[in-house]
Amino acid sequence: MYVYDAFDRTLVTERVAEFRDQVARRLSGELGEEEFKPLRLMNGVYLQLHAYMLRTAIPYGTLSSEQMRMLAYVARKYDRGYGHFTTRQNIQYHWIKLAELPDAMADLASVGMHGMQTSGNCVRNITTDQWAGAAPDEIEDPRVWAELIRQHVTLHPEFSFMPRKFKIAVGTARRDRAALRIHDMALQMHRNADGETGFEVMVGGGLGRTPFLAQTIKPFLAKRDVLSYVEAVLRTYNQFGRRDNIYKARIKILVHELGPEAFAKEVDAEWATIKEGALALDDEAVTDIVGRFSYPHYETLADNPTELTQARKADREFAVWLDNSVANHKVAGYAIVTLSLKPEGGTPGDATAEQMQTIADLADHYSFGEIRVGHEQNLVLPHVAQRDLFAVWQALRDIGIAVPNVNLISDIISCPGLDYCNLANARSIPIAQEITRRFHDLDRQRNLGRLHVNISGCINACGHHHVGHIGILGVEKNGQEFYQITIGGKADENATLGSLIGPAVPYAQVADVVEDIATAYLALRERPEELFIDTVKRAGVEPFRERVYATR
Amino acid sequence: MPLVENGKVAEDRYVKVDDDASLPERVPIIVSAKRFLAEADTLIGRDGSLGVAWPNDRRVNEIKPWLGHLALIALHFPKFRDGRAYSQARQLRETLKFGGTLRATGDVLRDQFGFLLRAGFDSFEVKKPADAAAFAKSVERFTVVYQPSADGRIPALRRRRQSLSAAKASETV
């Protein structure tokens, strides 16, 4: 965990004071809604269908147990007893009153949390691998770099009014668990032939109505240059990104229109003027930030302790969960535990105040006080001793979050959709709920294997439908909810955009179509180990299209 | 539209001269970029301070050759959400080392003062009188900054290390 010091705490507190003043001016009528809107957006406050929504930043998805307890408290005190974890590793409250917002923010600020830059045309929450610092396949902890960038872009005087929002993700592992290529800018750490580590820089990714995967503009950037290069990219975008059309304002359009080579040339020219300036990072600066992270004091333990092997033998249900939701840790004797927020019939990513409270307690007992939020809208206890796994499982089961469906068809990524969002054309949550009911049989889900379903209620693609193995996009046709279905997308290190399988289908048929696709896959796969995504790659869209539309 | 300079409401000494108007004698003037580029030699030779209103979609590098002759550059915010001039301001101050007055014009509102000041502006044509009066208060809002910028304030990254080395120094005494 990065430990906030007096500087960080002061800024967050001053921000609350500023926002309190802005809300007071809005309530008194001194500020009109038009003027207030960008100010509240800069603090993560949206006006939705029923109420104000408060989005709170969880920098790179890392939470302390103390922060999680505060999230539970805010859910109880100002909302309706729950919160919604998002694909941006943040949390949203959907039922907050404007007049109470400054108090809610002051409570969050008491644990170093805020809504700064969770909205507006600025650099948004920096995201990364939810297994950061625990994954065996990472070169080093990506959060150090995410934190350096977070600080650099916080209330940045130059980049708070860019053409559009700007999302940055950082990865340092072999596997991409942060969906790097769908970000405006992504940094992927590599080790070069000389053994030095640096970053591959990709720009121009993003979904929405014109989906693009980010393209590499710098194969290897020295670590000392990370901040100056980020600054050069942002400055180039701020000056040349389109402002005439909101749908063409993201950096992906600029990169596409200029071409990545020409864009990179502009960036390099700008970079040359600032590279050797105040943003060059010396080892001391990096060491200082590293030193502000507290790391667990692991015990010396062995893998597969007898407590674990015995419990696995004794309890089949536990064994199933273990195989599904628990991953290897870089330290012997420990494990990474994913907490599925996708129960049958539930809203993907929702957690109640009681669940949050219990998870905070479990983190204190079993995970060095740390919790993570992943972009799949699940939570993670990153450092659980293997001998404690059975106890953790029992406690999670008691609060309904030990469903062993991680990475299976019911582990659905979904935006809030028309139930909450005033941008949506169609509902997302009830579609997700119906799919989880259809596939409630876990043996059936396991037989289908790894299968990611992503649902967005509009073209803005908050549910990342383009990169779902099965992507579902809600559209409106003559006042009716229709859904376009894509297959074959993925968001990992081999990111691909999905292909449309045919005409949109009405609301009532979406779950049937998903069942048809699943059935088609079982018939098409060459062997049980061939994953859905690999079958689509091998066999193409056509056999799925035939199966789905033969009877429609 | 009130003008704020040095943190206070101030009188505007500059006269804005239209592209087809004749040049007034001796008083400080602001002309458009178009007129400036067409009549640079005449304008520079004239007696009296010279300012240029530079549009936000033109590279500031273009005025580099004349920067030493300019007393003021006005950068424009057609809407406060259009933040291109923040980049222009920093380029002028930090890369091109422009030492004259940098004036913000257009949709210049209270909640942007802090950003504008940090980007290197020191003159503000403020849209609302109430905002102009609140200038000093609103720029004092944040005592911590995270990034180096044109105002020369020391960012947190550096201040932390300064306090560390100060602590070390006092230990060794």
Image: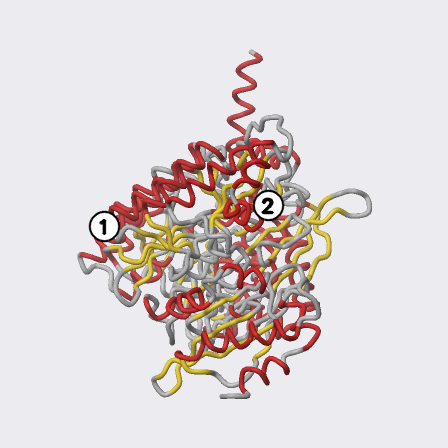
Does A330 sit left or right of A384 as displayed? right
Asked if marks 2 and 1 fall on the same chain, the answer is yes
- Type of amino acid at the residue the image marks with label 1: Glu
Chain for numbered disc 1: A
Residue A478 rendering spot, x and y as whole percentages: 36, 88
Host chain of mark 2 = A
Residue at x 54% of width, y 14% of height? B171
Quarter location, residue B109: bottom left
Q: Does label 2 or label 1 sit earlier along the sequence?
A: 1
Kindly give the residue lying farthest to the top in the view shown: B173
- Give amino acid for label 2: Ala
Q: Residues within 10 Å of mark 2 (few under 14, many from 20)?
A: some
Disc 2 to disc 1: CB gap under 8 Å: no
Residue A35, picture quadrant: bottom left
| Picture coordinates of residue A381, whole percent (x, y) | 50, 41
Residue A327 is tagged as: 2
Residue B128 drawn above or below residue A134: below
User: Number of marks in the image?
Assistant: 2
* Residue B131 visible within the image: yes
User: Residue A308, how many percent across, how many down?
Assistant: 57, 36
Residue position marked by numbered label 1 in the rendering: A100
**Dot 1, crowdedness within 10 Å: few (<14), some or many (≥20)?**
few
Position of A490 with respect to A114 (left or right) is right
A237 above or below A328? below
For mark 1, give the secondary structure.
helix
Does A386 appear above or below A78? above
Spatial CA span between label 2 and label 1: 41 Å
Q: Is residue A499 above or below residue A127?
A: below
A383 sits left or right of A495 in the view: left
Along the line of sight, which residue is nearer the eye, A109 or A423? A423
